[in-house]
Image (spheres, rainbow, N blue to C red):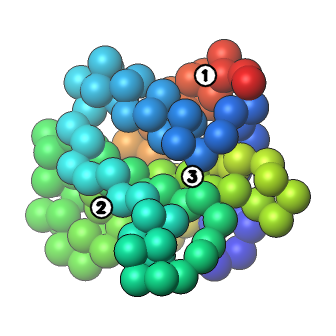
Amino acid sequence: MNDEDVYTWPSGIDVAATSALLVKTLTHVGAKVFAVIDQQAEARGVGLDMRGLTVLLFGNPRAGTPLMQSDPSCAFDLPLKIVVLETKDGQTLVQMLRAETFVSRYDVPANAAGVFTGAARLIETTLAGASS
């Protein structure tokens, strides 16, 4: 995947705190958080080490279901996913698939982009207020 395929935002707090803040915000606005996967903890569970990396799966079945009815293969990218990661230099980044990338991949109406752009605005606003 190219950098042009994902939104990327910096976070002023660590991976765990950023993930918790995003889950709280998503829940507050009525999104369904389907899963929070702490990849770092999973790696430790099998004796491996890695930097912080958490994947959040979230969405709204009222928005996602019609898209999957239009093109069932878009379930590869739905529910929406947020990746919260720690870079080599210790910075926390948040990434999510871009709306344009999703629309170009699947046979869905062009207005499907709104699902992603709305989530992107929410993430950006949430992270703007986050600091260590």
The quarter in which the N terminus is drawn is bottom right
Q: Can you give x and y, in whole percent of width and height, for residue 79 in the image?
A: 28, 56
Q: Determine the secondary structure under disc 3.
A: strand
Residue visible at 71% across and 47% down? Answer: 92
The quarter in which the C terminus is drawn is top right
Query: Which residue position is annotated with label 3?
Result: 84
Numbered disc total: 3
Question: What crowding class fits label 2: few (fewer than 14 Cα within 10 Å), some (14-19), or many (20 or more)?
Answer: some
Residue nearest the viewer, comparing 89 with 83: 89
Q: Look at the numbered discs 3 and 1 and tell me whether their residues touch, using CB distance below 8 Å.
A: no
Image height of 25 relative to 85, above or below: above
Query: Which residue position is annotated with label 1?
Result: 125
Identify residue type, mark 2: Leu
Query: Which residue position is annotated with label 2?
Result: 78
Image height of 108 relative to 32, above or below: below
Nearer-N-terminus badge (3/2):
2
Q: Is residue 46 left or right of residue 50?
A: left
Q: Quadrant of residue 87?
A: bottom right
CA distance for labels 2 and 1:
22 Å
Q: Is residue 85 left or right of residue 92?
A: left
Q: Determine the secondary structure under disc 1.
A: helix
Nearer-N-terminus badge (2/1):
2
CA distance for labels 3 and 1:
16 Å
Q: Is residue 75 left or right of residue 80?
A: left
CA distance for labels 3 and 2:
17 Å
